[in-house]
């Protein structure tokens, strides 16, 4: 019997075309292992922590089911590859793509422990997601902010006096930035300080990236659960959705 599609759909700002799902990984079942590719099973076995193995297997099985369901395919029938890296054109570390079937949506996924996030977009619209557990960063927090945030973002993070709120703001910035860089296709190598996400704004925020893989993206927070910062970014390739200037 086919296992039900896992994950909860998350509502986004109306300007988004992306569809987003969030889930938490229970114990993996034999049915989860069965839908993974040989490469995915090999990677699962390389985790030292058995709990990480369980989370990885269930999350990737859930992602396969969600991607396969609208295509009318069995989850194990999907074949994955990589888009070329926008920085070096390498094909072994660019953003993930579905290579079978060829007429499939763009997608991106993120996992941290038991939590996972998936987003899909139609056509050639690039998309990225990230989720981060909010945690204490007392050690070298200022250095980390200097290396990751723009001056305006650092000011925003430093405004509260409570350390917990500062950390929440920091990881909200990080999730938004990494979602944009994953949509770009370079990931963190694209440079966190090159992405200005204006975290004091609510709703969708247009962002311009001018490095390799340049483009304009709409980034929004994704409400998942307490203690986790999450974001989605999708390419703004339609002038009617640009909204306010991405520079102001």
Image: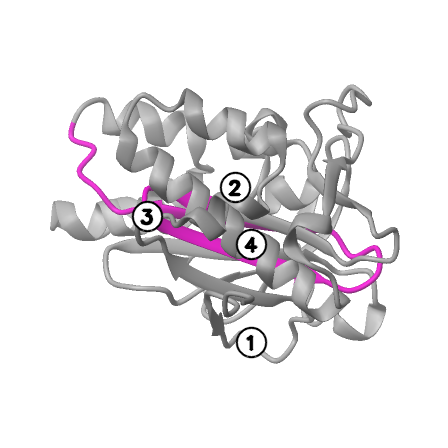
Q: Residue at x 50, y 70 (%)?
A: 4
**Percent coordinates x, y for residue 103 in the rendering:** 87, 57
**Which element type, helix, strand or loop, lies under badge 4?**
helix
Q: Is residue 133 magenta?
A: yes
Q: Tell me which segment is drawn in magenta.
A: 110-138
Residue identified by numbered label 3: 114
- Considering every residue shown, the one lying at the far front of the view is 1
Q: Earlier in the sequence, mark 3 or mark 1?
A: 1
Judge from the rendering whether residue 181 lies leftward or rightward of residue 149; answer left or right.
right
Q: Which mark is residue 178?
A: 2
98, above or below 136, in the image = below
State the separation of the CA atoms marked 3 and 1. 26 Å
Closer to the eye: label 3 or 1:
3
Q: Residue at x 78, y 30 (%)?
A: 86
219 and 29: which one is in front? 29
**Percent coordinates x, y for residue 93 in the rendering:** 68, 25
Badge 3 density bin: few <14, some 14–19, many ≥20, Cα 10 Å:
some
State the separation of the CA atoms marked 1 and 2. 19 Å
């Amino acid at each position: 019997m086919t296992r039900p599609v896992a994950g909860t759909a998350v509502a986004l700002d109306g300007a988004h075309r992306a569809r987003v799902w969030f889930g938490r990984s229970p114990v993996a079942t034999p049915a989860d292992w069965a839908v993974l590719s040989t490469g995915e099973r090999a990677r699962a076995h390389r985790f030292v922590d058995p709990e990480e193995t369980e989370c990885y297997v269930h999350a990737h099985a859930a992602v396969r089911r969600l991607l396969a369901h609208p295509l009318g395919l069995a989850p194990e029938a999907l074949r994955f590859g990589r888009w070329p890296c926008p920085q070096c054109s390498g094909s072994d570390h660019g953003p993930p793509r579905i290579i079978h079937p060829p007429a499939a949506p763009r997608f991106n996924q993120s996992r941290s422990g038991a939590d996972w996030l998936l987003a899909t977009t139609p056509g050639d619209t690039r998309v990225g997601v990230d989720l981060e557990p909010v945690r204490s960063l007392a050690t070298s927090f200022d250095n980390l902010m200097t290396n990751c945030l723009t001056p305006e973002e650092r000011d925003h993070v430093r405004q509260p006096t409570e350390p917990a709120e500062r950390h929440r703001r920091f990881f909200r910035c990080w999730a938004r930035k990494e979602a944009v860089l994953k949509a770009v296709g370079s990931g963190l190598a694209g440079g966190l300080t090159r992405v200005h996400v204006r975290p004091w704004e609510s709703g969708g925020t247009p962002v311009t990236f001018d490095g390799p893989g340049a483009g304009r993206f709409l980034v929004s927070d994704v409400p998942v659960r307490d203690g986790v910062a999450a974001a989605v970014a999708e390419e703004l390739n339609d002038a009617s959705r640009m909204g306010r200037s991405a520079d102001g």
